[in-house]
Amino acid sequence: MRHILINALVAIISTVCTFTLMKQFDETPATQEIVLASNAQLVKQASETETLVNTKPRQWANNFTAESDFRSVSAGATESVVNITTLSVTGYRVASGSGVITSRNGYIITNHHVVEDGSSFEVSLQDKRTFEAQLVGSDPTTDLAVLKISAGGLRPVPFGDSDNVEVGEWVLAVGNPFNLTSTVTAGIVSAKARNINILKGSYAIESFIQTDAVVNPGNSGGALINTNGELIGINTAIISESGGYEGYSFAIPANLVAKVVRDLKDYGSVQRAVLGVVIQDVNANLAEDLGLPSIEGVFISSVSPDGSAYKAGIKKGDVITEINGIATNSVPELQEQVARFRPGDRISLEYYRNGRRYFKSNIPLKGLSSTSFNFNRQ
């Protein structure tokens, strides 16, 4: 009897232990599932409110904004950029570069240095058609030239406003470096109104847009495009010790390009207006001596007695700060602004004299040939 009771007690205890263990094992997965679901919900909430970190490259690319996606801009720009081969009188190639279509009927902008040594010119379009081009006109003081081909239905690039270009904005350089046609590179605007002293002559205009977009030999005359697909400059030069790209490239601002192109098409040469002054940048010492409220403007060190500035009452020692409401805080900026006008055009000036600010409007500009101030910069 005693053995029966012991066996029964052992059986009861074993049964209770078995049920207890089974209950624990059954609850564990349920508990883990709830915890994992909570973490998943937290991850989902975090991904909706926080910036993704260390995402995969493809996922990062898909999150680009429209402004950062250059595909559509590149497709349009490459149709408007051509390859130019410059030939000698004997038919040998003496230069090659790029050009930008500006009209549906065949007008093309390029650099003066691309065409200056040529007797004939071949233009190759992006669709591989080739045309002989005629030189409409060329201007060494801005390093610009215009060619014309007999073709219709071309795609001209729209002009943007280079005055509104800002340092840090994205740009594309489109051209034919090393005869590699339809090449597109991207970068940002690094600076504006750069003078790198590559153009010769007292009246040369250098007010370049500096970028870090890759530009190499053959890109000269090609397009600098903003993210709206607008032309903001003509790529012209690089600073290099090796002969190739080293991080600095320079483009002629589109607003100056537009004026030069109009002149070359209308007259065959550039119609240059000048103020008739010798100018220099304002530095801290000069600003203090002149009692200027800030270090701004361009200092007039000499005035031609038969120039536009003299007739308007501008004097030696004045500091010009604006032309037509646009700031001129360096010699290149002032030169660029004046170079956009033709003789006979009228401008307004804002300037300092003896520490006081003045404004004068309706100033008629004279032409370069009518001003005998041959050594001045503007």
Image (cartoon, rainbow, N blue to C red):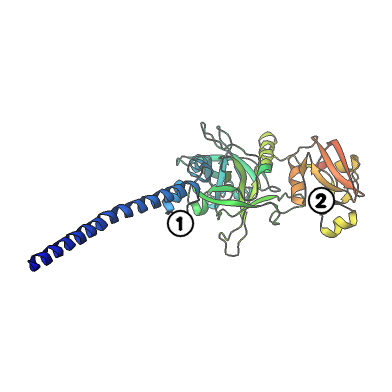
Q: Is residue 12 above or below residue 331?
A: below
**221 or 22, nearer to the observer:** 22
The kind of residue tagged 2 is Val
Q: Dot 2, how many residues are within 10 Å of its Cα: few (below 14), some (14-19), or many (20+)?
A: many
Do the residues under discs 1 and 2 have CB atoms within 8 angstroms? no
**173 or 59, nearer to the observer:** 59
The kind of residue tagged 1 is Asn
Q: Which residue is mark 2?
A: 298
Res 160 quadrant in image: top right
Q: Which residue is mark 1?
A: 54
Q: Quadrant of the N terminus?
A: bottom left
**How many marks on residues?**
2
**365 or 11, nearer to the observer:** 11
SS under mark 2: strand
**156 or 228, nearer to the observer:** 228
Q: Is residue 86 visible?
A: no
Q: Residue at x 53, y 34 (%)?
A: 150
Depth check, mark 1 against mark 2: the one in front is: 1
